[in-house]
Image (cartoon, rainbow, N blue to C red):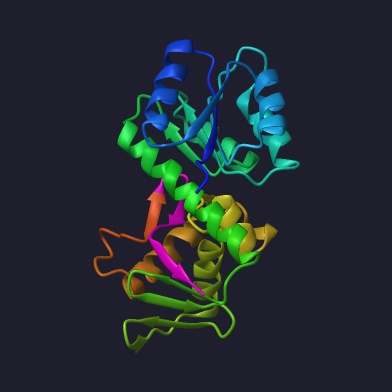
Amino acid sequence: MNKPRILVVEDETDIRRFLRLALEREDMTVFEAGDALQARIDAASRQPDLIVLDLGLPDDDGKAVIRDVRGWSSAPIIVLSARESEAEKVAALESGADDYLVKPFGVPELVARVRAQLRRASLAGARGQASAIVRFGDIEVNLATHEVARGSEAVHLTPIEFRLLATLVRGQGKVLTHRQLLIDVWGPGHASRSHYVRVYMANLRQKLEEQPARPRHLVTELQVGYRLAGIVESS
């Protein structure tokens, strides 16, 4: 099996080398770039399986790099940045990033997020298209028939609840912002009504989570959106 190829884009040399060592210990091949220009060159020439990207680069903003790479590549991008405002997180995710981790960070969390994104990308590549049936925990979702089951019991979802769940399923673990969910589920005219997502997410958790107040699968991320965690099988 080929080692995952990771491009680390970080202008601080010590952090960049630290990230390289941490990922190489996890049996990954790592390439380094210290600025936006080199990041664009390496993303095109190295064809990485995943990119870890700092936003504060000396020659350009990292969000511009994300938008450029997204023009031709679907490789997962994890932002690793000291910028912790909600506006920055939302802007990076809507530029095309798949996840956002704030500095300082723990290596185990970074590695876990890298592996989760690699699994998502591998699954999407292997299937070629969204699978009809997806399972996470004891939940089974049939995207073709709109049927949902928890264990052996059928779960009734309203049409909007199902559209919200299906959007998260198709995201395969990617963080989806409130705005993205509102546009996909309710339409562009509702893009500013973030309370819709909170209300319907609470409903989904009540129906699908074992402990709705401590969800394992319908996870709030970064205070700006949600992701579906724990997909273990699809067919």
Viewed as shown, does residue 131 lie left or right of 38? left
Within the image, what quadrant is residue 37 found in?
top right
Relative depth, front residue between 153 and 156: 153
Is 161 one of the magenta-colored residues?
no
Task: Determine if residue 187 is in view.
Answer: yes
At 33% from the left and 88% from the top, the residue drawn is 153
Q: Number of marks in the image?
A: 0
> Is-magenta flag for residue 226?
yes
22 shown above or below 195: above
Residue 223 in view in this figure: no
Residue occupying the point 54% across, 14% down: 11
Q: State the residue lying farthest toward the front.
A: 1
Name the residue rendered at 31%, 59% in the picture.
Answer: 216
Task: Find the residue positioned furthest to the right.
Answer: 71
Give the image quarter of residue 155: bottom left
Image x and y of residue 106, in percent: 31, 31
| Position of residue 44 in the picture relative to residue 214 (left or right) | right
Up the image or down, 141 lies above or below 51; here it is below
Q: x%, y% of residue 123?
A: 54, 60
The residue stretch that appears in magenta:
221-235
Specify the principal SS of the magenta part.
strand
